[in-house]
């Protein structure tokens, strides 16, 4: 008899927490620093002087410029996340790509290990591509020729 979706989600709470807590702490610290830096810029003071609401100033002007370095960090953390998944899936006995990598290392199944590493490398490559495309979408000053 298979478990339901709710049971599976309950078993994923601790592994997701273990993987995401250090990464989210770094991202939130970075976003806070960038927001403090951007909020002291002249164009933010001009937007406030024009009478724009604080929410519009924060979301449209400040956050849009402060989130660019955070997106870079998120893209770079993808490799850390995939490497951490190998360890976390092994500790919590969860089936997935990390467990497959661990099992193929233990059993010395190099062809499966090569396929997993190729897949993970492709995932990191596509993540970096998505970060670059998102940069061009968020900041119109960035042009790729």
Image: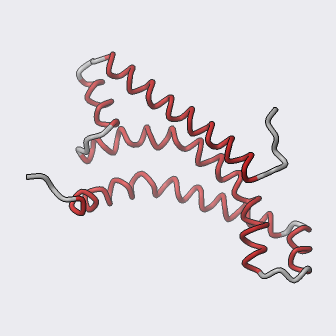
Query: Where residue 90 appears, x then y in whole percent?
Result: 28, 40
In the figure, is residue 87 to the left or right of 77? left
**Quadrant in the rendering for residue 11:** bottom left
In the figure, is residue 42 to the left or right of 28? right
In the figure, is residue 54 to the left or right of 30? right
- Number of disc labels: 0
Of residues 43 and 84, the one nearer the viewer is 43
The correct choice, above or below, for 97 with respect to 69 in the image is above
Residue drawn 59% across and 41% down?
A: 76
Residue drawn 50% across and 34% down?
A: 123
The correct choice, above or below, for 15 with respect to 86 in the image is below
In the figure, is residue 113 to the left or right of 68? left
Q: Quadrant of the C terminus?
A: top right
- Farthest residue in the left direction? 1
Query: Where residue 27 appears, x then y in whole percent?
Result: 59, 56
Query: Where residue 28 appears, x then y in whole percent?
Result: 60, 62
Of residues 42 and 9, the one nearer the viewer is 9
User: Coloring scheme of the render?
Assistant: secondary structure
**Quadrant in the rendering for residue 112:** top left
Query: Where residue 25 appears, x then y in whole percent?
Result: 54, 59
The correct choice, above or below, for 137 with respect to 34 in the image is above
**Quadrant in the rendering for residue 13:** bottom left
């Amino acid at each position: 008899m298979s478990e339901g979706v709710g049971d599976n989600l309950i078993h994923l709470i601790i592994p997701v927490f273990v993987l995401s807590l250090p990464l989210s702490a770094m991202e939130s610290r970075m976003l806070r620093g960038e927001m403090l830096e951007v909020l002291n810029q002249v164009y933010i003071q001009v937007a406030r002087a024009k009478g724009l609401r604080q929410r519009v100033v924060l979301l449209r002007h400040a956050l849009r410029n402060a989130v660019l370095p955070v997106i870079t960090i998120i893209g770079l953390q993808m490799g850390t996340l995939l490497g951490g998944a190998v360890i976390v899936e092994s500790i919590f006995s969860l089936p997935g790509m990390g467990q497959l990598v661990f099992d193929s290392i233990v059993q010395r199944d190099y062809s499966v290990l090569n396929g997993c590493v190729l897949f993970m490398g492709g995932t990191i490559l596509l993540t970096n591509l998505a970060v670059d495309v998102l940069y061009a979408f968020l900041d119109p000053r960035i042009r790729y020729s």
